[in-house]
């Protein structure tokens, strides 16, 4: 929270995107007990447990609520399913479906998530920041339009060219619902929130302004109008040079950086405020010198300004939990060797 206020801390605080997940045996055990992935997201007991697991094991400085960005389309009755080996699936939406969307019942459908946040604030150490989150409208829309994940978001890009008005309506609608969702998380005890725009990198220049910046600005303005103290991290993965004005245009307090962002550019971005990132998750899989060199380069380039140490995207299932132990030790200055 100090870094989000613009302070420089040495060592920097750290957490990892997807820190609760399949690389941890204790996660896989709870996941097996919970039933489906959505059952896990909507069980306050199990969701609290898996959020706490990486905090117990590694003592990260922040816990991120265990849920998924796709609980919003689920609450909008898009028939969201997570089937083993297929990733998320749902009923693809068309222009008529978009205009028929209703915000009624969304917040009450998500009540178990807010209960998880309340449990967590009670059970977490006081010094551990609790992060809430939502997906950015563009990223959530890509799944709603295609009905599943795609490598390049071609279905949503095409839909936006063909049905511009309906598409903008969808993004504005998702921005409103997401702002309400974040306000509820903050009221339940989240200290700060992150907006995940995982697919921002496939947008052209004009579309980045309209589909990535405008809806995220709308969420941030709406949340801050109601909760002026709220701190918001915005992560636009793959945004590259567009990050130059992203903080200023969206009003985010901190910006997340993926591993493709050059550290010299990251240093520039850090002059305007806190940055978060940006270790390649594959360095955590590799371990050893690849891990150590990646950490050292980030600390050297960004350690003298406001930095929240993180990966450049989520940790992957094949990461060795021992490599994460080494990462934490090294960021905290206890020269951990991951060999
Ligand atoms: O970071 C955390 O530890 C908090 C929990 C979290 C999850 N998903 C848990 C999860 C967060 C913040 C997310 C965000 C999310 N979900 C994003 C944005 C960030 C990103 O990674 O790009 C996106 C695009 C999604 C949609 C989604 N959910 C995908 C593409 C998948 C993978 C499907 C698969 O089978 O691998 C999920 C499932 C998911 N969400 C898992 C976890 C731990 C794995 C599912 C399982 O346990 O079976």
Image (tube, rainbow, N blue to C red):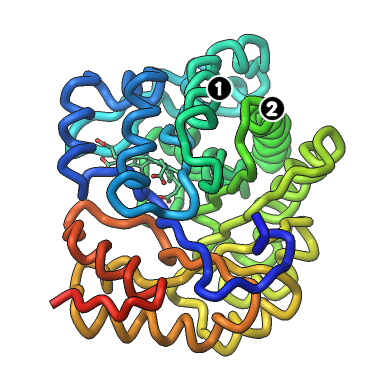
Residue at position x 35%, y 81% in the image: 294
- Residue that carries the numbered disc 2 in the rendered image: 187
Residue 201 lies, in percent from the top left, at 52, 63
- Residue that carries the numbered disc 1 in the rendered image: 114
The image shows residue 239, relative to residue 136, as above or below, that is below
The image shows residue 234, relative to residue 46, as above or below, that is below
Quadrant in which residue 240 is drawn: bottom right
Residue at position x 26%, y 76% in the image: 336
Badge 2: residue crowd in 10 Å (few <14, some 14–19, many ≥20) = few
The image shows residue 136, relative to residue 329, as above or below, that is above
Residue that protrudes farthest toward the left in the picture: 339
Quadrant in which residue 15 is drawn: bottom left
Residue at position x 41%, y 35% in the image: 66
CB at disc 1 and ligand 1 closer than 8 Å: no
Residue at position x 35%, y 50% in the image: 19
**Ligand 1 appears in which quadrant?**
top left
Q: Nearer the viewer, residue 196 or 239?
A: 196
Circle 1 SS class = helix
Q: Nearer the viewer, residue 110 or 301?
A: 301
- The answer to whether any part of residue 235 appears in the image is yes
Q: Is residue 276 left or right of residue 326?
A: right
Badge 1: residue crowd in 10 Å (few <14, some 14–19, many ≥20) = many
């Amino acid at each position: 929270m100090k870094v989000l206020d613009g302070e420089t801390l040495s060592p920097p605080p750290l957490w990892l995107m997807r820190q609760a997940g399949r690389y941890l045996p204790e996660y896989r055990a709870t996941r097996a007990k919970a039933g489906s992935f959505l059952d896990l997201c909507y069980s306050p007991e199990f969701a609290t447990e898996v959020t706490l697991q990486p905090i117990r094991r590694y003592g990260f400085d922040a816990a991120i609520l265990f849920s998924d960005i796709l609980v919003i389309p689920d609450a909008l009755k898009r028939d969201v399913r997570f089937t083993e080996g297929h990733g998320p699936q749902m009923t693809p939406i068309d222009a008529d479906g978009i205009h028929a969307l209703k915000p009624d019942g969304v917040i009450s459908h998500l009540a178990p998530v807010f209960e998880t946040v309340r449990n967590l604030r009670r059970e977490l150490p006081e010094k551990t920041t609790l992060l809430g989150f939502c997906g950015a409208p563009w990223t959530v829309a890509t799944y709603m339009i295609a009905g599943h994940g795609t490598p390049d978001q071609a279905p949503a890009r095409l839909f936006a060219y063909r049905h511009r008005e309906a598409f903008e309506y969808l993004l504005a609608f998702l921005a409103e619902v997401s702002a309400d969702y974040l306000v509820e998380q903050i009221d339940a005890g989240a200290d700060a929130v992150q907006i995940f725009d995982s697919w921002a990198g496939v947008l052209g220049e004009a579309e980045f302004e309209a589909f990535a910046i405008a809806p995220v600005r709308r969420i941030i303005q709406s949340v801050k109008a109601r909760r002026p103290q709220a701190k918001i991290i915005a992560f636009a993965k793959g945004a590259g040079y567009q990050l130059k004005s992203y903080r200023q245009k969206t009003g985010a307090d901190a910006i997340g950086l993926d591993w493709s962002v050059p550290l010299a550019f990251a240093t520039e971005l850090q002059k305007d405020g806190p940055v978060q990132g940006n270790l390649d998750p594959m360095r955590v899989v590799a371990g050893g010198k690849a891990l150590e060199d990646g950490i050292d380069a980030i600390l050297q380039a960004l350690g003298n300004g406001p930095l929240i140490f993180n990966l450049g995207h989520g940790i992957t299932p094949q990461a060795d939990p021992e490599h994460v132990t080494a990462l934490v030790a090294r960021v905290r200055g206890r020269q951990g060797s991951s060999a």
